[in-house]
Image (cartoon, rainbow, N blue to C red):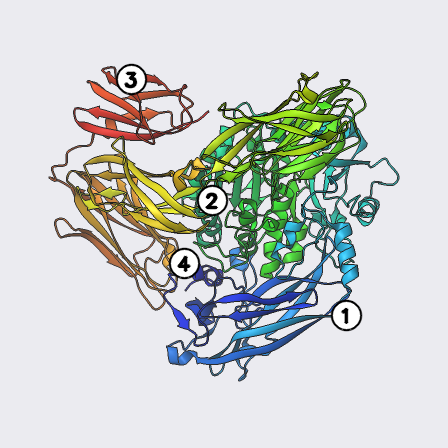
Amino acid sequence: MKAIFTYLIFILVSASLMANKNEIKLKNAQESDLKMVSKSTTGFQVVSTLSKLDYFVVKTEKGSFVQLKINGYTRNNDFGSPLLPIQKRMIEIPQNANVKVNILSYDEEIINLNDLGLSMKLMPSQPSVSKSADPSEIEFVYNESVYKLNDFNKRPMAEVIELGTMRGVKLGRLEIAPFRYNPVTNELKVYNNIQIEVVFENANLSKTNEIKNNAYSPAFENNFSKLLNYSPVRSKDAITQYPIKMVIVSDPMFETILQPFIEWKTRKGFTVVEAYTNDASVGTTTTSIKNYIQGLYDAGTPTDPAPTYVLFVGDLAQIPAFNAGAHYTDLYYFTYDGTSDIYPEIYYGRFSASNTNQLQPQLDKTLEYEQYLFPDDAFLNDVILVSGVDASWAPVNGNGQINYGTDNYFNAAHGVTDYTWLYPASDAAGVDVTIRNQFSQGASLVNYTAHCSEDGWADPSFTVANVASLTNAHEYPLSIGNCCLSNKFDVAVCFGEALLRAENKGAIGHIGGSNSTYWDEDYWWGVGSEAVSATPAYVAGKLGAYDCLFHDHGEAEIDWFVTNGQIMNAGNLAVTEAGGDEQYYWEIYHLMGDPSVMTYISVPPALTVSYAEPLPVGIGTLDVTTEPYSYVAISQNNVLLDAKYTGSGTTVTLEFTPFTVPGTADIVITKQFRQPYIATIDIFAANTDNDAMMASISVPATYESVTAPDVTPTVTIKNLGNLNLTSAQVGYEIDGGSVVSQAWSGNLAQYEDDVVTFPLITLASGTHTITAFVSWPNGVEDEFHPGDTLEKVFHVTAGDAATVGVYEFLDVYCAAETITPTVTISNKGDVDLLSCDVNYQIDAGAVQTINWTGTLAPNAETTVSFPAITLSPGDHTFNAFTSNPNGGTDENASNDNMAVNFSVFAAAQTVSVDILTDDYGSETSWEITDDDSGDVLYSGGPYADWDSQHFITEYCFGEGCYTFTIMDSYGDGQDGWSNDGSYAVVNVTTSTALGSGSGNWGSDDVVNFCITGVGINEVAQSKVAVYPNPTNGELFVKKGAGNAHVEITNVIGELIYSQEVSDELIRIDLKGNSKGVYFVSVDLNGQIITEKIVLVR
């Protein structure tokens, strides 16, 4: 008999483990969707459609039930009653509006589940389970009285739940309930093609716009992207009128050491408000501090905005938190719309410190990180992702979250090397030490999901005591703990505090809970508000924290969450949309660290920047050309002069009071996933009669497209002389080529400017530099030459063709076979992909190329098949890569390559593993080990529950002896409830049954077998070692005794090293070569072993 808690866990995990073979087709719709029909300030209309339902059978202490599953839908929250999936979407509600929901039309279908062979009742809805819960105490909630009612349940087909207000925007949740159920007759009523009208009666639109304008912050707009009907503030396209405001609330003991941090934030473009608790207007209580911050927020206007960020500096004794009963929270410092409001108006974080020794490391690490002062930035390419140990929940909720991250974002296509530990691999011996060592080697992000305490991760173990032993100086990640209590900051020192306070080690920030977290809510936090699955797919509009951070599925800018404070909000908003325990989640999740920091994921490229310099005294503007979505700031002596956001454009005009004396000013430009641009600009006194300046180059733009290569070069000249400028010579050259020059005439007073255009030219693909100049003002030599010329780097992009899939390759072939290599490419650029070279290379062999042509829209994919090839024995690497998109240079080479490794035996024997699962497939796993080495060669499971499945897989084995071990985590073998399982191991080559079992074989069963007499041509790889890998340029090849030939090639087949060697160990210096992937081939008397290596810096 399975225990109660086991039933409940099966209920929650089985949906995602099954292969979705059980489905009910619906009659009245061709697709499942929610489409906007019309939208205005007074309401909107949507249509909800459903084409099918997935279902599966669940066994509990109360008997078997049927559970429905629809991707993008979540459960109803009337626990104990039948679980009927609901579509939930957040909406915006105007001020003072009465919300009315009208059902305009719908289709109705009644399905008798008995007629489908589903005599069981629908599964009762169950509450979320805390990660801190004792499994033996988890209650199965079942309302028997509801199941005795001979009637369809009653609830509105659609309704709006008013939630609260965030940053001046009233929030609601539209809940669409398309199902009704009669538990006595076992009939399901489906409402389809529901046309829903939401009307905002008596809405005060002028008040709505006034509040939104006064509270507007472009850094907060992304929170509203989840709102189905959101109307942005029309007068704002970006940060064009004012800088971002940040408030630092601190104990006065930290004032002195905070100054370098405050000065940097000012240079970065923030208006920083210092608020110390010895100031009576700030105070030391939660009430006084909240009143102070709310006063700044309420006083916000479009020209003097409300704060966007608040950073607390101090532990609880210095900056108290609100006592929410079972935990402390900083949330209620930032909720200003009544006592029931739970949605913060400001992003917030905390540097928790009781003294300056605890604060200084946090300041030092943040300053180094934001100013990109790393001695070596290669660590940014690495992430550590861990689904911790929990046999019941980790296989789906934990693994599903991590799988979603690696499938979509943390992968080679994004320039990332992921060190991923899924369950049960995370439960292996020594994994905790390995993960802590990986942390010590540096990473850009570390995400753990499972069990924690205030002391740190439970299993694998990573605790406060381990932080002191870390060695990741100058290599600090953002740490995310989707687990209990890791930011419980009312104890002496919690895990998040330890990571931040550690000197020259630890983390740049830690997001985690001040109380216990929940399995479903943590999944939604990372993945988005969709059905829980071990292999979730991206669903547009259902965005979680990962999606909002990377935003590379074509999401609009409003969906981008680029700072650490925004990442936390993105996760909590996903929980809100899913209808989870939202108030609890907004209360407990906290960020230890600066909420305005943008985390780097992979080594970011440098920004492209151009502006005229030096800057003359008397000038009050500066045109800066850079990349889209960049924040540009100018300051002098740590006083902010202006800051603007480029938005989707590339040029901003900074405006400030004209300089009156010579000196310097600071320019800082920041953008997500880019290195910051930090420079000084000279200011000089213009005291000449004839002085013309090249002020800016507007065309070519920073980014041009090879699909529209014809442009008219355009520049702006400015008169700096005392005399009016009436004539000049203006010209340019590109990449040091021919000079194009023309005479200009006009009449410019001092500091006036004019736009000069040149004849049409055709740009070539690639990165280029245009140098523009102005000379001979008023027919005489320029009297002050600085500023006469201006350079601008521009990119003529041919698009971004990425390799996203390589198919037809197995890991191991038992003999030489003929296969058809297939490569999938994706258009990751902004323009249609019309042509592209698709290439592959095996080891260091010849490059094979197919010139693909067609029309591939942005984010679309296509598959290219190559001629069949016959594989040769040995260990090999198949490297596929794209080149020449649209006939030009790829704008993002980091996603061009994808490699797969495979091995081919000259001769071997094939052994099949045949698994028929029982009702409890998630309990079953197996492995095959080599008796000599003890290495695990192959493994499988766990599998799905409540859906008996048959798996037959074949594997290659050379001469030797092996052990097959099948395991059952519950201890009753494959003894199912209604379906028993079985296993069999068969030598296919010799048609010999090696072992089998079925039913209750206990906790494990073993099959020992040997492979003999197969005449394998022994592969010599065991004699060859290539290390370290990755390498910083110093590489060692150990090959054993005898002569050998060693070659190294790059990914396009160019030979960079070739040498006959006799020494057993040789050293190779690769430090003069570019970073990237290389292949080392060692020829031992005709036996070629090839290893892929990565050269880093």
For label 2, the residue is 829
Judge whether residue 753 can be spotted in this image.
yes
The mark lying in front, picked from 4 and 1, is: 1
For label 4, the residue is 17
Judge whether residue 580 can be spotted in this image.
no
The kind of secondary structure element at disc 1 is loop
Circle nearer the N terminus (1, 2): 1
Number of residues whose C-alpha sits closer than 10 Å to that of mark 3, classed few (under 14), some (14–19) or many (20 or more): some
What is the three-letter code of the residue carrying label 1? Asn
The kind of secondary structure element at disc 4 is helix
What is the three-letter code of the residue carrying label 2? Gly
For label 3, the residue is 1065
The mark lying in front, picked from 1 and 3, is: 1
Circle nearer the N terminus (4, 3): 4
For label 1, the residue is 202
Distance between mark 4 and mark 1 Cα atoms: 48 Å
The kind of secondary structure element at disc 3 is strand
Number of residues whose C-alpha sits closer than 10 Å to that of mark 4, classed few (under 14), some (14–19) or many (20 or more): many
Residue 1061 position by quadrant: top left
